Image (spheres, coloured by chain):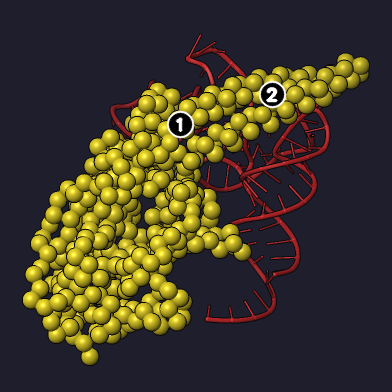
Chain colours: A yellow, B red
Amino acid sequence: MIDLRMLREDPEAVRASQRARGEDDGVVDALLSADETRRSAVARADSLRAEQKQLGKQVGKASGDEREALLVKGKDLAAQVKAADTERAEAEDKLTELHGSVPNVVHPDAPAGGEDDYVVLKHVGTPREFDFTPRDHLDIGTALGALDTERGAKVSGARFYFLTGVGAQLQLALLNMAAQQAIENGFTMMITPVLVRPEIMSGTGFLGAHASEVYRLRDDDLYLVGTSEVSLAGYHADEIVDLGAGPLHYAGWSSCFRREAGSYGKDTRGIIRVHQFDKVEMFVYCRPQDAEAEHDRLLAWEEQMLAKIEVPYRVIDVAAGDLGTSAARKYDCEAWVPSQQAYRELTSTSNCTTFQARRLNVRYRDEDGRPQIAATLNGTLATTRWIVAILENHQDADGSVRVPEAMRPYLGGREVLRPA
RNA sequence: GGAAGUGUGGCAGAGCGGCCGAAUGCACCCGCCUUGAAAGCGGGCGUCCCGAGAGGGACCGGGGGUUCGAAUCCCUCCACUUCCGCCA
């Protein structure tokens, strides 16, 4: 949820944000008016209630005819209070609904526009020249006995897979390396629930425009998380966290589940786009004024990981229309995928400012001891998809794959993976 | 899955349907005392909403109900505890 106080003071900033996202800026006026309606409804209900309380005290002391008269009056007042309170509740519901539908205010420096309007911030490394035709990760992985998508489909359907043998080891190596780095950088390692309650899923902003992406267990009224960001954001819901010693850094290790509704036909080969994968994710709670600096740190940690797998990548500043509901700004690191001659997302780091924390009611105490809404950020350290970039960029003509040096300690010292 | 119980402020723990936003203790903060500390004494000590302010309102797990009036009665959901069963 966006800050309503900010909205009242500077509605034009929110309109500009909506336009940058390519969304309706008319909601700003609707929201302002709903806010006004609510506030007057609250004032009316409160004063009637005050009157009722006064009367209630008199009834307690009175007796006889006087008491009878007061009771009659009280009955009438009770009806008025009830009516006013219903009006207040309706005004509040309407405001909440509208409020919840407005995405975060984008950072003024984020590029405007849609998916293709990103700005490339930098390139790191150069795509390798192959003196043979590079194969794609599915071919390489299958030959290595690392990947089995056919049986994945047999058992679970399209976009499911088995990581087998060295493939499973590769993923463990990657995630362990990520966990290790997180711990070295002061993160608290977490293994999180992957099923969460509706309030938590909704609080993180994933039940808005992207609700169809989320798996839901109707029988139990639970949702499968698409990232441990959800669980980690919920971790401190309804709490006043202590940021006295600086931002809180958590790293969540979990499986992630995505319906991939509406992506029919896209990335159907291999494990680029799948319904289930594993991820180590960084998550930060901090003061709003520290959020941008934390965002830069998250990006740096992502690049530290990318350096370890020795693949060429670029960093993009994601355009406003592609930010998702909660982010004010987002940087993606995209690795070069030789078989596609394209850069594909390996990491994504979002600054959600106070948007998520306001919904989840996560606060901290400022210098004066006053509770204030915290800011939250997240960023990827490693995912199953990274295997794609590793296999394809480090392949050789004979189908073997060189193991990046930093990963070798996590693979028992192996330097090369060879087909059987 | 079945049965019983519990859910009050940072913690512990009282609370007859009106005098309860809520006793008391601990913790915490400020002051006095002290060379310093402890003890002792005095004061303070929740969150949210509306309001320029004065002030008003809400909150005793969540939601609903009864009543002129609910922390207190009823319903329901959730969480936790214990017992039984079942499965790992």
The N terminus of chain A - image quarter: top left
Q: Earlier in the sequence, mark 1 or mark 2?
A: 1
- Residue at disc 2, secondary structure: helix
Residue A26 badge: 1
Residue A244 badge: none
Q: Residue at x 40, y 39 (%)?
A: A23
Foreground disc of the pair 1, 2: 1
Residue A299 visible in the shown view: yes
| In front of the other: A240 or A134 | A134
Residue B5's image quarter? bottom right
Q: CA distance from mark 1 to mark 2?
A: 35 Å
Mark 1 vs mark 2: tell me if same chain: yes
Is A201 located above or below residue A71 in the figure? below
Image position, residue B68 (x, y; %): 80, 28
Residue marked by disc 2: A49
Image position, residue A420 (x, y; %): 22, 90
Mark 1 belongs to chain = A
Image position, residue A154 (x, y; %): 45, 82
